[in-house]
Amino acid sequence: MAIFAAFVVFGYLLGSLPFAVIVSRAFGLADPRSYGSGNPGATNVLRSGSKLAAVLTLLGDAAKGWLAVWLASRYLGDVSYAAAAVALTGLAAFLGHVFPLFLKFKGGKGVATALGVLLGFSGWLALAALAAWLLVALVTRYSSLAALVAALVAALAGWLLLADPLTAGCVSVLSLLLIWRHQSNIGKLRAGTESRIGRR
C-alpha cells in the first residue's frame, strides 16, 4: 500500500506545478496573480495579450492531470487496488492545482487540469466535457459558464461511461470542487459583470 500512497502524493505534487506562473516568467510576462481575476490559469494568462503563453499554460495544466493518471495506470495496472489508486491519483492531481503546495495553497480553478484527469480516465468522458465547454464558450464567450456546464456534464457522464464506481465518484467530487471554485464567477454572471474570453 506504500506505493498507493506514493502515487497519490506524486499526483498532488505534479498537480501543484503552476504552469501559469512558470510560462509567464519564461515569457517575461507579469505574474498572472497580479492582474485580471488573479487566477493562475490559462484564461487569465490570455488577458496578458500573449495567446502562445495562454496555450502553453493550458497544455501544461492539462498534461499534468493526464500524466498523473497515465503513470498510475501504467505502473499499477496489475495490482488489486489499481482502480482506486488511479482514481485517487487523478483527484490528487486536480487538488494539487487548486491547492498547490508551491503557491501557498492558492491555486487556479482547475478546468484544464480536470480535463487532463478526465482524459486519463476515459477519452469519451473528456470529449463529452470538452464538447460542452466549447459549445457554451463559443456561444456565450464566458469561460466560467462553459466550465460550470462542462463540470455538470462530466459528473453525469462519469456515471454513464465509467465502470468503476470509485472513479465515477472521484469525477463527481472533482466536478463539485470545480463548481465551488467558480463561486465568485457565478455571482458576476448573475450581475452581468463577468469578463468574456479574450478581454484583457
Image (cartoon, grey):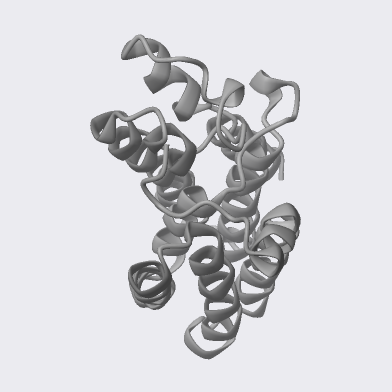
Looking at the image, which is closer to me, 40 or 60? Answer: 40
* Residue 43: x %, y % from top left: 45, 43
Disc tally is 0
* Residue 190: x %, y % from top left: 70, 69
Residue 103 versus residue 100 in the image, above or below: above
- Residue under the image location 49 percent in, 48 percent down: 113
* Residue 17: x %, y % from top left: 53, 27
Direction front: furthest residue: 192
Residue 56 versus residue 62 in the image, above or below: above
Does any portion of residue 78 appear in the rendered image?
no
The quadrant of the picture occupied by the C terminus is top left
- Please state if 114 lies on the left or on the right of 61 as rendered: right
Does any portion of residue 143 appear in the rendered image?
yes
- Please state if 89 lies on the left or on the right of 196 as rendered: right
Corner quadrant of residue 159: bottom right
- Residue under the image location 42 percent in, 35 percent down: 47
Residue 44 versus residue 131 in the image, above or below: above
Corner quadrant of residue 52: top left
- Residue under the image location 41 percent in, 76 percent down: 132
* Residue 48: x %, y % from top left: 39, 28
Looking at the image, which is closer to me, 44 or 82? Answer: 44
- Please state if 31 lies on the left or on the right of 89 as rendered: left
Direction left: furthest residue: 52
Residue 70 versus residue 14 in the image, above or below: below
- Residue under the image location 29 percent in, 39 percent down: 55
Looking at the image, which is closer to me, 130 or 193? Answer: 193
The quadrant of the picture occupied by the N terminus is top right
